[in-house]
Amino acid sequence: KDERKAIIMDLQNNIDFERNSSMVGHSYKVIIDEVGDNIAVGRTQYDAPEIDKIVRINDYVKKGDIYQVNIDDFNEYELIGSLKK
């Protein structure tokens, strides 16, 4: 049972890596869910709150607004973006 779980988790991690890496270099509409000191967290139009991955933005934005965001990088749990100029 644990071995099957590990296999499934490994497959999911590979899928997430492929999806995240394919998004780098593209821009998406992102709705801002949280704003902190010099950082904001949002999600693309394809992601559900509290379920899917987040987009971290190091720009000044307002909670609830939608911005066009360039995806510059990613890690295991989040996309890292900047406002499209």
Image: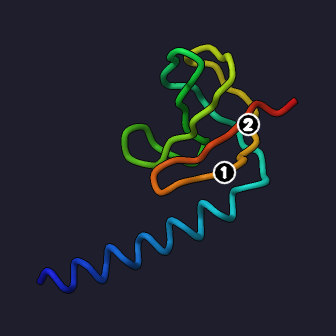
Circle 1/circle 2 CB separation < 8 Å: no
Residue 4: percent from left, percent from top:
21, 85
Residue 12, above or below 58: below
Label 1: few (<14), some (14–19) or many (≥20) C-alpha neighbours in 10 Å: some
Who is closer to the viewer here, 31 or 57? 57
Seen in the picture, residue 15 relative to 71 is either above or below; the reply is below
Q: Position of residue 81 (x, y in %)?
A: 68, 40
Residue at far right of view:
85
Position of residue 71 in the picture relative to residue 5 (left or right): right
The x, y position of residue 29, in whole percent, is 70, 37
Residue type at mark 1: give it. Answer: Asp
Task: Give the label on residue 45, or none.
Answer: none
Asked whether, in this view, residue 28 is left or right of residue 48, the answer is: right
Q: In the image, 29: left or right of 50?
A: right
Comparing 37 with 40, the one in front is 37
| Outermost residue toward the left in this view | 1
Which residue is nearer to you in this view: 83 or 32?
83
Q: Look at the picture and state if 70 lies above or below 35.
A: below
Residue 23 image-quadrant placement: bottom right
Q: Quadrant of residue 84?
A: top right
Residue at 59% x, 65% y is: 19
Residue 34 rendering spot, x and y as whole percentages = 48, 22
Q: Is residue 29 left or right of residue 55?
A: right
Q: CA gap, disc 1 to disc 2?
A: 12 Å
Look at the numbered disc 2 and give the secondary structure of its residue. strand
Q: Residue at x 60, y 29 (%)?
A: 31
Q: Amino acid at mark 2?
A: Val
Mark 1: which secondary structure?
strand
Who's the residue at 73% across and 34% down the image? 82
Q: Which residue is denoted by mark 2 in the rendering?
A: 69
Q: Which residue is mark 1?
A: 73
All told, the count of numbered labels is 2
